[in-house]
Structure formats: C-alpha cells, structure tokens
Amino acid sequence: MTVDTGEAPITGAVVERVAQGVDPTPSAIADALLALNAELIGRHGELERRAEHVTVDGTRAYRVGRDEWAALLDDFDFDESTAAALRLAHTEQARLLFATAVGADDRFTSDEAGVVVGIDTAEQF
C-alpha cells in the first residue's frame, strides 16, 4: 500500500523510494511534507519570480539552490534526517515534473534542489 501524502504535491511512490535510503519512515516523511506544504504555498509568488519552473498537471516544480532550500526550512524544527528526506522527496518529484515538461532541462546540479507546490492552491495568491 502506498503512503498517503494528503495535500502535499509529492506522490506516495516518491516518498517510499526516498524512505528506503533515510531514517524517517514513509509516514513520518509524509507528515513533514504536509507541515512544509503550507509554508511553500505562502512562498509561491517569491519562488515564481526567482526560480526556473515548470507546470505539469496542476503542479508547479521549481529549481532552487540548496541554500535557498535550507532557508525554506528555517522556520521548522526538523531533525537533519527529516530535512534531508524532505529535500530528496521534493527534488525527485521536481525532476520527474521537469522531465515531463516539454523543452525543460531536467538535469539538476549537485547544488540545486527541487521545490514542488500544488498550483491550484498556489494560484489563489
């Protein structure tokens, strides 16, 4: 059974793949994704102005630097392994969306991370 990620725009399959290589369980990663999701929705406009992005099937993926990714987590008290799992999950989902988008470069460098936001919610801002 695939983990339920609720409102977070990361698929359960991505969460399960990420959880194979990190300490948090898939359900703990999903809970952290939900907590982070509201913050990301609030930063949608800022991300849109500064980051390369694609939109696929109602979901927007951004390519950001790792420092910017770390800044997104500043308001949270995630332990190091959960923070790493969140970055991995968002980056994998973003890579999948960039690969699906026509004409987009889906190659992320080692100093880049992905951020994924549900556009239906984000467009309200």
Image (cartoon, grey):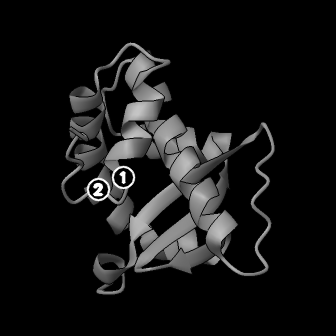
Q: Secondary structure at mark 1?
A: loop
Image quadrant for the C terminus? bottom left
Residue type (three-letter) at the residue carrying disc 1:
Thr
Instruction: Count residues near mark 1 (Cα–Cα under 10 Å), then give few for <14, some for 14-19, many for 20+.
Output: some
Instruction: Determine contact: label 2, label 1, CB under 8 Å.
Output: no
Whether residue 92 is situated above or below residue 19 in the rendered picture: below
> Residue 30: percent from the left, percent from the top?
26, 39
Q: Which residue is mark 2?
A: 8
Q: Residue furthest top?
A: 23
What amino acid is at disc 2?
Answer: Ala
Using the image as rendered, state which of residue 49 and residue 89 is in the foreground.
89
Cα separation, mark 2 vs mark 1, equals 8 Å
Residue at screen point 36% across, 18% down: 79
Residue drawn at (38%, 53%) of the image: 10
Residue appearing at x 29%, y 56% in the figure: 8
52 relative position to 2: left or right:
right
The residue located at (51%, 53%) in the rendering is: 93
18 or 72, which lies in front?
A: 18
Number of the front mark, 2 or 1: 1
10 Å crowding of disc 2: few (<14), some (14-19), many (20+): many
Q: Quadrant of residue 6?
A: bottom left
Q: Position of residue 12 (x, y in %)?
A: 32, 46
> Residue 11 has which mark?
1
Q: Could you tell me if residue 67 is visible in this image?
A: yes
